[in-house]
Amino acid sequence: MTITDVRVRKITKEGKMKAVVSITLDDAFVVHEIKVIEEKGLFIAMPSKKSADGEYRDIAHPINSSTRELIQKTILESYEKALSEPDETV
């Protein structure tokens, strides 16, 4: 599996969430709504949905640690690069 595209949308409001990211895998499958969170360092939170019992459950997630590490490393590198780029004006 190769991450072929990463799109970072920076969040400018104060708070723990710093960006929302979409990744494309093998130019064939996209995962939206991956969050970059800062809490004792940066990490990613996979897309999730609130269940009937009030718990949040991942909608999509890696099933092994090496894949999670690859995704997190790639996203955080792209986020750091995006920080040095000017904000887009809409």
Image: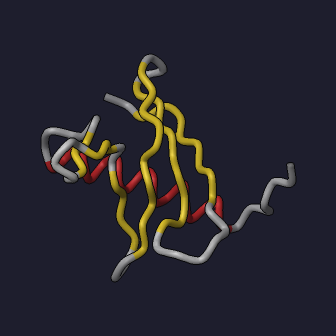
Q: Which residue is at 42% across, 66% downward?
A: 37
Residue 62 drawn above or below residue 42: above
Residue 41 drawn above or below residue 7: below
- The front one of 12 and 6 is 12
Q: Which residue is at 37% across, 31% downward?
A: 2
Return the residue found at the far top. Answer: 28
Quarter residue 72 falls in: bottom left
Q: Which residue is at 51% across, 47% downward?
A: 21
Number of numbered discs on residues: 0
Residue 58 in picture, x, y percent from top left: 25, 43
Residue 27 in picture, x, y percent from top left: 48, 20
Residue 14 in picture, x, y percent from top left: 59, 77
Q: Is residue 10 left or right of residue 24?
A: right
Q: In which quadrant will I find the N terminus?
A: top left
Q: Is residue 49 left or right of residue 22?
A: left
Q: Which residue is at 50% across, 39% downward?
A: 22
Return the residue found at the far front. Answer: 52
Q: Is residue 44 left or right of residue 52?
A: right
Residue 17 in picture, x, y percent from top left: 49, 66
Return the residue found at the far bottom. Answer: 40
- The front one of 11 and 75 is 11
Residue 76 drawn above or below residue 15: above
- Which colour assignment does the render follow? secondary structure
Quarter residue 3 falls in: top left
Q: Is residue 59 left or right of residue 53?
A: right
